[in-house]
Image (cartoon, grey):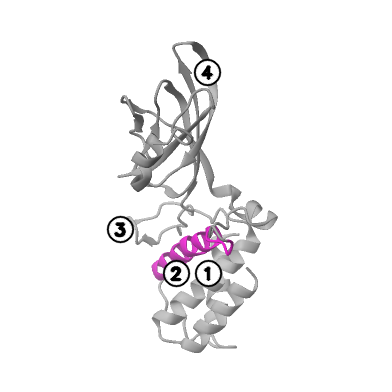
Amino acid sequence: MLNETLQIKLKQRLNKLSSNDFDNIENWQILEAFNKAQIEWARRQLHGNNIYKEGDELSKRRVDDLQILLEELDLTGVETDRYLETDNFPVDTYLEYKRVSTKATNDCCSDARSMTVYLAEEANVELIYRDELKRPDFEWSETFCTLIGNTIRIYRRDFTIVEPVLTFYRKPRLVEFLGVLNPYTATTSTADVLCEFKDDIVELIIDETAALIAGDIENMIQMQREQQSAERNN
């Protein structure tokens, strides 16, 4: 969707019929609210209503809507006698963990073997490491990892971690308007940056944006209407 269309649709959501009551909203305010609404929409889709509270693959629609945010990153790091600790965590773009995959080798097997990697709680590391049924095991091709301090620790025992890959959801790309101050960088944008989502999702995010701005200007009726519209069509 073009940025001009986005602005027209947003102002139409806020203005009363045949009026220009809210045309004094600055374009940088629209930018800030829209980019905030993108993050809120993405986080809500990732939060599910099942027992694990995971919603990113709850339905075919969720898979289709969120696949654009999935990325893979080849991990690098330093290996100790207990784990490999990464040094290239994607701090600026990272939104939510999906999975870690890796291969491993040991002294008896030089051919890399694919490992199953489970995400574990940092509090349970010692318990898992001592449990013969849960601790890293090359023969069973299983190990676990934890997240700590913007690093990933992939645990090991008698094997070496090779070719680890992080699959994660990144933050949505920030929209920019040509010639308008970018509130995130405090610089004037030199080019239009379009929303990367499909037009039907952009329509929902516009409703979210209108609700945010309506709340900022204390138009509670308009805010409730746009919130209901966004949620009903989600």
In depth, the one of 162 and 15 nearer the eye is: 162
State if disc 2 and disc 1 touch (CB < 8 Å): yes
Labels 4, 1: front one: 4
Residue position for label 2: 30
Residue position for label 1: 7
Report the amino acid beneath label 4. Ala
Labels 2, 4: front one: 4
Mark 2 residue crowding within 10 angstroms, few (<14) / some (14–19) / many (20+): many
Look at the image and give the residue range highlighted in magenta.
27-50
* Image coords of residue 73 (percent x, y): 47, 35
Mark number, residue 112: 4
State if disc 4 and disc 3 touch (CB < 8 Å): no
The question of residue 59 being in magenta is answered with no
The mark nearer the N terminus, 3 or 4, is 4
State if disc 3 and disc 1 touch (CB < 8 Å): no
Classify 62 as above or below 221.
Answer: above
* Image coords of residue 51 (percent x, y): 56, 61
The mark nearer the N terminus, 1 or 2, is 1
45 vs 155, left or right, is: right
Q: Quadrant of residue 56?
A: bottom right
Q: Quadrant of residue 179?
A: bottom left
* Image coords of residue 201 (percent x, y): 61, 62
What is the CA distance from the residue labelled 1 to the residue labelled 3?
21 Å
Report the amino acid beneath label 3. Ala
State if disc 3 and disc 2 touch (CB < 8 Å): no
State if disc 1 and disc 4 touch (CB < 8 Å): no
Mark number, residue 186: 3
What is the CA distance from the residue labelled 1 to the residue labelled 2?
8 Å
Residue drawn 49% across the image and 71% down it: 209
Classify 190 as above or below 78.
Answer: below
Residue drawn 52% across the image and 71% down it: 208
